[in-house]
Image (cartoon, helix red, strand yellow):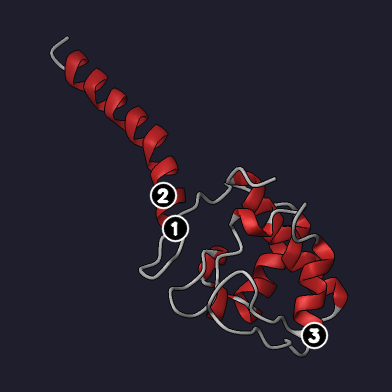
């Protein structure tokens, strides 16, 4: 009996930690010191988006930031209402990679074309960006 109350307190503490630690860590993962937006990361990605994340990390994150949150003074966040599908459709991402983009929404300067990516690579990267957008209320 004398261990019952401390045991219940321990169980409750573990339960609270488990419930709230996962939520906080998903937000914390998305933070970077020069990020232009703060986002939540989905707990799971589709297969195509998982492949796209690897492509994004290798080819896009240096400018657009980890998890596409942008970088102050470098490049815009892709998890932003400007890049919602109804304004910048998936083909816009294909064209941006293939031909580059003149600055038109932001003052970061022009984006150069990115060499070495296939349409399939860009499709996967776009799937990753779209899943991050949807998870953060950009549809």
Do the residues bearing badges 2 and 1 touch, measured as CB atoms within 8 Å? yes
Secondary element type, mark 3:
helix
Camera-side mark, 3 or 1: 3
User: Foreground: 78 or 118?
Assistant: 78
Which residue, given by chain and number where applicable, does mark 2 sit on?
A: 25
How many numbered discs, if any?
A: 3
Q: Is residue 103 above or below residue 2?
A: below
Do the residues bearing badges 2 and 3 touch, measured as CB atoms within 8 Å? no
The quadrant holding residue 135 is top right
Secondary element type, mark 1:
helix
| Left or right: 23 in relation to 85 | left
Q: Residue 29 — which label?
A: 1
Rendered residue at 55%/79% (across/down): 63
Which residue, given by chain and number where applicable, does mark 3 sit on?
A: 99
Secondary element type, mark 2:
helix
- x, y (%) of residue 116? 78, 89
């Amino acid at each position: 009996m004398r261990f019952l109350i401390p045991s219940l307190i321990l169980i409750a503490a573990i339960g609270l930690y488990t419930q709230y630690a996962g939520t906080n860590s998903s937000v914390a993962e998305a933070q970077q010191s020069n990020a232009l937006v703060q986002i939540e990361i989905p707990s799971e990605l589709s297969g195509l988006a998982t492949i796209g994340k690897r492509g994004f990390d290798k080819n896009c994150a240096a400018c657009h930031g980890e998890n596409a949150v942008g970088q102050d003074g470098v490049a815009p966040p892709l998890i932003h209402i400007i890049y919602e599908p109804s304004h910048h459709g998936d083909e816009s991402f294909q064209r941006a990679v293939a031909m580059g983009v003149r600055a038109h929404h932001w003052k970061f300067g022009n984006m150069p074309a990115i060499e070495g990516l296939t349409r399939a690579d860009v499709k996967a990267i776009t799937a990753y960006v779209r899943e991050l957008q949807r998870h953060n209320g950009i549809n």
